[in-house]
Image (spheres, helix red, strand yellow):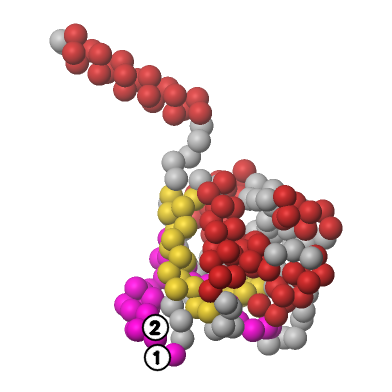
Amino acid sequence: MSRHNQAWLIVLALCTACASADNKPLPISVTVDVFNDAGVAMAVLKSAELEAERIFEAAHIQTRWQYCPRGQDKQETDPACRALPAPNQLSLRIVPGSTKGNDDVFGVAFLGADGMGAYSDVFYGSVERLHSQAHSNVGRVLGHVMAHEIGHLLIGSHAHSPWGIMSAKWHDQELQRLEMGRLLFTPEQEKSIYSRLHGGSPGTATKEADR
Protein backbone atom coordinates (compact mmCIF):
# COMPACT_ATOMS: atom_id res chain seq x y z
CA MET A 1 0.00 0.00 0.00
CA SER A 2 1.35 3.43 -0.95
CA ARG A 3 2.13 6.14 1.61
CA HIS A 4 -0.64 8.24 0.03
CA ASN A 5 -3.27 5.55 0.61
CA GLN A 6 -1.99 4.93 4.13
CA ALA A 7 -2.37 8.63 4.91
CA TRP A 8 -5.98 8.61 3.75
CA LEU A 9 -6.75 5.55 5.85
CA ILE A 10 -5.29 7.26 8.91
CA VAL A 11 -7.38 10.37 8.28
CA LEU A 12 -10.55 8.33 7.86
CA ALA A 13 -9.81 6.36 11.03
CA LEU A 14 -9.25 9.57 12.96
CA CYS A 15 -12.52 11.05 11.64
CA THR A 16 -14.42 7.90 12.67
CA ALA A 17 -12.85 7.98 16.12
CA CYS A 18 -13.76 11.65 16.53
CA ALA A 19 -17.38 10.98 15.55
CA SER A 20 -17.62 8.10 18.02
CA ALA A 21 -16.03 10.09 20.82
CA ASP A 22 -18.24 13.09 20.18
CA ASN A 23 -21.27 10.77 20.18
CA LYS A 24 -23.42 13.41 18.50
CA PRO A 25 -26.09 12.19 16.06
CA LEU A 26 -26.02 13.50 12.53
CA PRO A 27 -28.76 16.06 11.80
CA ILE A 28 -31.94 14.71 10.23
CA SER A 29 -34.73 16.71 8.65
CA VAL A 30 -38.50 16.88 9.06
CA THR A 31 -40.98 18.72 6.84
CA VAL A 32 -44.04 20.19 8.57
CA ASP A 33 -47.06 21.25 6.50
CA VAL A 34 -48.64 24.17 8.38
CA PHE A 35 -52.33 24.97 7.82
CA ASN A 36 -53.16 28.37 9.30
CA ASP A 37 -56.91 27.95 9.81
CA ALA A 38 -56.89 30.44 12.70
CA GLY A 39 -55.59 33.25 10.50
CA VAL A 40 -52.54 33.90 12.67
CA ALA A 41 -50.58 36.95 11.52
CA MET A 42 -47.62 35.91 9.38
CA ALA A 43 -45.18 37.83 11.61
CA VAL A 44 -46.36 35.79 14.61
CA LEU A 45 -46.21 32.56 12.60
CA LYS A 46 -42.67 33.29 11.42
CA SER A 47 -41.61 34.05 15.00
CA ALA A 48 -43.15 30.75 16.16
CA GLU A 49 -41.42 28.88 13.35
CA LEU A 50 -38.02 30.26 14.38
CA GLU A 51 -38.67 29.33 18.03
CA ALA A 52 -39.71 25.78 17.17
CA GLU A 53 -36.79 25.51 14.75
CA ARG A 54 -34.37 26.43 17.54
CA ILE A 55 -35.88 23.79 19.84
CA PHE A 56 -35.50 21.07 17.22
CA GLU A 57 -31.99 22.19 16.27
CA ALA A 58 -30.97 21.63 19.89
CA ALA A 59 -32.07 18.01 19.32
CA HIS A 60 -30.07 17.84 16.03
CA ILE A 61 -33.24 17.91 13.94
CA GLN A 62 -33.62 20.26 10.98
CA THR A 63 -37.16 21.48 10.27
CA ARG A 64 -38.62 22.69 7.01
CA TRP A 65 -41.90 24.61 7.22
CA GLN A 66 -44.32 24.50 4.31
CA TYR A 67 -47.33 26.83 4.50
CA CYS A 68 -50.55 25.43 3.09
CA PRO A 69 -53.30 28.04 3.60
CA ARG A 70 -56.95 27.17 3.10
CA GLY A 71 -59.23 28.64 0.46
CA GLN A 72 -58.38 29.45 -3.11
CA ASP A 73 -54.70 30.03 -2.50
CA LYS A 74 -52.55 28.19 -5.02
CA GLN A 75 -50.58 26.53 -2.26
CA GLU A 76 -53.69 24.63 -1.17
CA THR A 77 -53.58 22.68 -4.43
CA ASP A 78 -49.82 22.18 -4.27
CA PRO A 79 -49.24 18.40 -4.47
CA ALA A 80 -46.60 18.75 -1.75
CA CYS A 81 -49.27 20.00 0.66
CA ARG A 82 -51.43 16.99 -0.11
CA ALA A 83 -48.70 14.37 -0.01
CA LEU A 84 -49.35 11.22 1.99
CA PRO A 85 -47.77 11.44 5.44
CA ALA A 86 -44.36 9.88 5.92
CA PRO A 87 -42.12 9.54 8.97
CA ASN A 88 -40.40 12.79 8.04
CA GLN A 89 -43.42 14.71 6.69
CA LEU A 90 -46.02 15.83 9.20
CA SER A 91 -49.10 18.04 9.24
CA LEU A 92 -49.83 20.76 11.80
CA ARG A 93 -53.08 22.71 11.70
CA ILE A 94 -53.53 25.89 13.74
CA VAL A 95 -57.22 26.20 14.61
CA PRO A 96 -59.08 28.87 16.65
CA GLY A 97 -59.86 26.61 19.62
CA SER A 98 -60.70 23.19 20.97
CA THR A 99 -64.09 21.72 20.10
CA LYS A 100 -64.18 20.39 23.67
CA GLY A 101 -64.03 23.92 25.08
CA ASN A 102 -61.10 23.14 27.37
CA ASP A 103 -58.90 26.24 27.67
CA ASP A 104 -56.18 24.26 29.49
CA VAL A 105 -55.50 22.14 26.41
CA PHE A 106 -53.25 23.81 23.85
CA GLY A 107 -53.26 21.17 21.15
CA VAL A 108 -53.86 17.60 20.14
CA ALA A 109 -51.86 15.00 18.23
CA PHE A 110 -53.75 12.23 16.45
CA LEU A 111 -52.06 8.90 17.08
CA GLY A 112 -52.77 5.52 15.57
CA ALA A 113 -53.21 2.19 17.28
CA ASP A 114 -49.45 1.72 16.94
CA GLY A 115 -48.88 4.93 18.91
CA MET A 116 -47.67 6.87 15.87
CA GLY A 117 -49.26 9.65 13.84
CA ALA A 118 -48.73 12.43 11.32
CA TYR A 119 -51.48 14.96 12.08
CA SER A 120 -51.76 17.48 14.91
CA ASP A 121 -53.78 20.57 15.84
CA VAL A 122 -52.77 23.63 17.87
CA PHE A 123 -55.50 25.70 19.57
CA TYR A 124 -54.56 29.32 19.03
CA GLY A 125 -57.14 30.68 21.49
CA SER A 126 -55.50 28.74 24.31
CA VAL A 127 -52.07 29.92 23.15
CA GLU A 128 -53.22 33.56 23.33
CA ARG A 129 -54.60 33.06 26.84
CA LEU A 130 -51.32 31.52 28.03
CA HIS A 131 -49.41 34.36 26.35
CA SER A 132 -51.49 36.91 28.30
CA GLN A 133 -51.19 35.10 31.62
CA ALA A 134 -47.45 34.52 31.30
CA HIS A 135 -46.73 37.97 29.82
CA SER A 136 -44.67 36.23 27.16
CA ASN A 137 -44.27 36.88 23.45
CA VAL A 138 -47.14 35.14 21.63
CA GLY A 139 -44.85 33.88 18.87
CA ARG A 140 -42.54 32.32 21.45
CA VAL A 141 -45.44 30.57 23.19
CA LEU A 142 -46.90 29.36 19.88
CA GLY A 143 -43.52 28.00 18.79
CA HIS A 144 -43.17 25.97 21.97
CA VAL A 145 -46.69 24.56 21.66
CA MET A 146 -46.01 23.66 18.01
CA ALA A 147 -42.81 21.87 19.06
CA HIS A 148 -44.71 20.02 21.79
CA GLU A 149 -47.40 18.72 19.43
CA ILE A 150 -44.87 17.75 16.76
CA GLY A 151 -42.97 16.03 19.55
CA HIS A 152 -46.01 13.81 20.17
CA LEU A 153 -45.96 12.75 16.52
CA LEU A 154 -42.23 12.05 16.54
CA ILE A 155 -42.04 10.27 19.89
CA GLY A 156 -45.36 8.42 19.87
CA SER A 157 -47.42 7.26 22.82
CA HIS A 158 -46.38 8.11 26.37
CA ALA A 159 -44.44 11.18 25.17
CA HIS A 160 -45.23 13.29 28.23
CA SER A 161 -42.46 13.69 30.77
CA PRO A 162 -42.05 15.37 34.19
CA TRP A 163 -39.81 18.08 32.68
CA GLY A 164 -38.80 19.64 29.38
CA ILE A 165 -40.82 20.59 26.32
CA MET A 166 -42.95 17.45 26.65
CA SER A 167 -44.21 18.26 30.17
CA ALA A 168 -47.92 17.52 30.38
CA LYS A 169 -48.60 20.74 32.33
CA TRP A 170 -46.66 23.97 32.09
CA HIS A 171 -46.38 25.65 35.46
CA ASP A 172 -44.24 28.59 36.57
CA GLN A 173 -41.02 26.58 36.25
CA GLU A 174 -41.78 25.53 32.67
CA LEU A 175 -42.84 29.06 31.70
CA GLN A 176 -39.61 30.43 33.17
CA ARG A 177 -37.59 27.94 31.14
CA LEU A 178 -39.66 28.87 28.09
CA GLU A 179 -38.65 32.52 28.51
CA MET A 180 -35.01 31.54 28.96
CA GLY A 181 -35.03 29.31 25.88
CA ARG A 182 -34.33 26.22 27.98
CA LEU A 183 -37.58 24.28 27.53
CA LEU A 184 -36.18 21.54 25.30
CA PHE A 185 -36.38 17.81 24.50
CA THR A 186 -34.59 15.47 26.91
CA PRO A 187 -31.79 13.18 25.64
CA GLU A 188 -34.14 10.19 25.99
CA GLN A 189 -36.75 11.93 23.84
CA GLU A 190 -34.12 12.73 21.22
CA LYS A 191 -33.30 9.00 21.00
CA SER A 192 -37.00 8.16 20.60
CA ILE A 193 -37.34 10.70 17.79
CA TYR A 194 -34.36 9.24 15.95
CA SER A 195 -35.81 5.75 16.30
CA ARG A 196 -39.13 6.97 14.89
CA LEU A 197 -37.56 8.71 11.90
CA HIS A 198 -35.31 5.77 11.07
CA GLY A 199 -37.96 3.11 10.96
CA GLY A 200 -41.33 4.16 12.42
CA SER A 201 -44.44 4.70 10.34
CA PRO A 202 -47.57 6.79 10.95
CA GLY A 203 -50.77 4.90 11.63
CA THR A 204 -54.44 5.62 11.08
CA ALA A 205 -55.60 8.27 13.52
CA THR A 206 -57.57 6.58 16.28
CA LYS A 207 -56.32 8.14 19.50
CA GLU A 208 -55.53 11.64 20.68
CA ALA A 209 -52.70 12.98 22.82
CA ASP A 210 -53.70 16.26 24.42
CA ARG A 211 -51.50 18.96 25.86
How would you rate the neighbour count of disc 1 (Cα within 10 Å): few for under 14, some for 14-19, many for 20 or more? Answer: few
**Res 206 visible:** no
Question: Horizontally, is 76 left or right of 110 in the view?
Answer: left
Quarter where residue 47 is shown: bottom right
Q: Amino acid at mark 2?
A: Glu
Is 87 in the magenta?
yes
Q: Residue furthest right?
A: 172
Compared with 101, 57 (above or below) is above
Residue farthest to the top?
3
3D distance between C-alphas at marks 1 and 2: 7 Å
Q: Position of residue 62 (x, y in %)?
A: 46, 52
Camera-side residue: 205 or 210?
A: 210
How many badges with numbers are in the image? 2
Asked if residue 27 can be seen in this view, the reply is yes
Q: Tag 2, which secondary structure? A: helix
- Answer few, some or many: residues within 10 Å of disc 2's Cα (few below 14, many 20 plus, some between 14 and 19): some
Residue at position x 66%, y 77% from top? 124
Q: Give left or right: position of 172 versus 82.
A: right
Residue drawn at x 44%, y 24% as measured from the top left: 18
Q: Which mark is residue 76?
A: 2
Quarter of the picture containing the C terminus is: bottom right
- Percent position of residue 175, x then y: 77, 58
Give the residue number, with chain letter if any, for mark 1: 72
Q: Which residues are magenta?
A: 71-98
Q: List x then y, in percent, for residue 84.
A: 38, 74
Residue lying at 68% horizontally and 50% vertically, measured from the top left: 181
- State if disc 2 and disc 1 touch (CB < 8 Å): yes
- Residue shown at 74%/63% (left/top)? 136
Above-or-below relation of 81 to 9? below
User: Which residue sits furthest front?
Assistant: 43
Q: Secondary structure at mark 1?
A: loop
Which kind of residue does numbered mark 1 sit on?
A: Gln
